[in-house]
Image: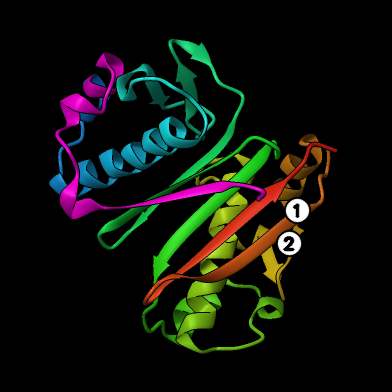
Amino acid sequence: MPYQLKVVDLSSLPPADGILSERERAFYQTLRFPKRRTEWLGGRFALKQLLQERFLRTELFDVEVLPHESGKPVLLVGGEPCNLAFSITHSRGFAAAAVSATYEFLGIDLEKTEHRIDAWANDFFHPSELTARDDAFLTGLWTQKEALVKLLGTGLSLNSYDVRCVDGNPQFFGPALDVYNKLGAPEICVETRELLPGFMFSAAYAKRA
């Protein structure tokens, strides 16, 4: 398996004090809106549970996922950097986390399938990507693009036209290509499926070249 995956229901999360470290709790308290708080907490709970169940024997609050100026969070275990590749996502009542011990680059995205108008598709996708127009395809394509952005580790700073996925094949242009080349231009695999009923999921992963 290139990665391990954990999905959690946001309606049944344990209290934050049992999940978060002191530094994470300080950031959690700055989140003003309940929905954002729940999603943020759920993603970290999914990741910490996955690490505890599959990779590490440690308490949840000993695992920290902290913001970083690059836009991609950093993972610490017992206060020390952890070199496992990881990614977090959430959508409409669910959160998911993935971890890989064999691939250095990893990005995932989960989105609820819903109707998306042509104007939306034309704004966010290059014409070469639009090989179909049905709701599941467009939602899946969006998850592919988001997973690739997360793999690059740039946060939301890239133009959506510069990160493309044509028939499952990643393509990068402009600043996104610069970032990709700085990573060593690794060969990226992208997989997309319906992870939950009515939800499309994509994972992008690569080994360091």
Q: How crowded is mark 1: few (under 14 residues within 10 Å), some or many (20 or more)?
A: some
* Identity, as a three-letter code, of the amino acid under mark 1: Ile
Residue 14 position (above or below residue 117) = above
| Magenta stretch in the rendered image | 1-25
- Judge whether residue 2 is colored magenta: yes
Residue 201: in sight, yes or no? yes
Instruction: Check the image and tell me how it is coloured.
Output: rainbow
Location of residue 116 with respect to 23 vertically, above or below: below
The residue drawn where x is 48% and y is 74% is: 139
* Residue for badge 2: 170
Q: Answer whether residue 123 is magenta in the image.
A: no
Label 2 near label 1: C-beta < 8 Å? yes
Q: Is residue 61 above or below residue 32?
A: above
- The residue closer to the viewer here, 112 or 61, is 61
Residue 204 x, y percent position in the rendering: 64, 54
Determine the image quadrant of residue 209: top right
The amino acid on which the numbered mark 2 sits, given as a three-letter code, is Pro
Residue that numbered label 1 is attached to: 188
Whole-percent x and y of residue 85?
Answer: 60, 35
- In the picture shown, does residue 189 fall above or below 114? above
At mark 2, the secondary structure is: strand
Where, by quadrant of the figure, is residue 44 drawn?
top left
Please name the residue shown 67% across and 80% down the image.
127
Q: Pointer 2: residues within 10 angstroms few (<14), some, or many (20+)? A: some
Any mark on residue 209, and which? none
Q: In this view, does 207 lie to the left or right of 199?
A: right
Of helix, strand and loop, which one carries label 1? Answer: strand
